Amino acid sequence: MTTAQRQVPPTTTSDRANAQAPRATTRFLTEALRAPHQIGAIAQSGPRLAAQAAGLLVPDGDPQTVVELGPGAGAITDVLHARMPAGSTLTSIEINTTMVAHLRETRPWLNVVHGDAIDLPALLRTAGLPPPDLIISALPWSIISTATQPRILAAITDAMHPNGTFATVATLPVRMLPSARRFRRHLHRSFGSVSQTRTVWRNVPPAHLYVCRSPSTRTALRAPTKR
Ligand SMILES: C[S@@+](CC[C@H](N)C(=O)[O-])C[C@H]1O[C@@H](n2cnc3c(N)ncnc32)[C@H](O)[C@@H]1O
């Protein structure tokens, strides 16, 4: 089994995460400056935003298959891991090799897949995972090209469980950029339901999540739309 089943009590995980926090911050910032085209942010998600993401897990529910896209240095990863129902699996898919090495070194319990979110269905097949119940993304959509955004969203809707949830971080400063507006249109084309969490003003920068359900099928996506 290559997936990360929750094996340690939440307190142990958060204690470890706290101890690693300064190192993770340094790694993240260094990599953000070295590879801005991949990281797309200078600060990691804060604990309140991470808690919003973990709040989408069904507490004390059945084991869930959880996938994280763009875990970076693990800011959301640890909170998800701590809150997952027992027997759940967490798989983190990361494109940046330095972040992959950092996650593997600091989180031996985590199943880290080095890959591109655009290949999500194939990556999950290779890992032997069922369609995820929850996909959390902190992908830097505003620097992902207009052509690639819908391809990644199609990979997500293809891969996830039909009753599953996809949630993605959106930061306030880029909200009015044309690329962010296009992204919102793509989200509404890709999902039957798109809602928004309350803004976490104490995050740097302030941010919220788009929470998306009822993934459209490929056929529906190809159909002409009036939107
Ligand atoms: C803004 S950082 C978010 C890091 C962390 N999840 C957080 O919230 O602090 C975006 C992360 O997504 C990764 N990333 C960017 N494009 C990706 C892709 N196509 N597939 C997988 N990961 C990607 C980057 O390397 C980076 O680690």
Image (cartoon, rainbow, N blue to C red):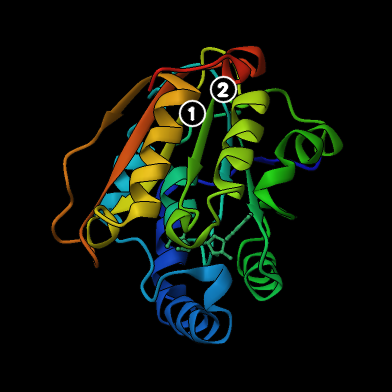
What's the residue at 42%, 36% (across, down)? 167
Mark 2 falls on what kind of element? Answer: loop
Q: Which circle marks residue 63 in the picture? A: 2
54, 191: nearer the viewer: 191
Marks 2 and 1 close (CB-CB < 8 Å): yes
The C terminus appears in which quarter of the rendering? top left
State the image coordinates of residue 55 (x, y, percent, origin top left).
Answer: 32, 34
**Around disc 2, counting alpha carbons within 10 Å, would you say few (fewer than 14), some (14 to 19), or many (20 or more)?**
some
State the image coordinates of residue 166 (x, y, percent, origin top left).
Answer: 47, 31
Q: Which circle marks residue 85 in the picture? A: 1
Q: Specify whether residue 12 is in view.
A: no
What's the residue at 45%, 82% (across, down)? 29
State the image coordinates of residue 62 (x, y, percent, origin top left).
Answer: 52, 16
Inspect the image, locate mark 1, and give the three-letter code of the amino acid beneath it. Pro
What's the residue at 68%, 66% (across, down)? 100
Q: Is residue 161 left or right of residue 11?
A: right
Q: Is residue 23 above or below residue 221?
A: below
Q: CA distance from mark 2 to mark 1?
A: 6 Å
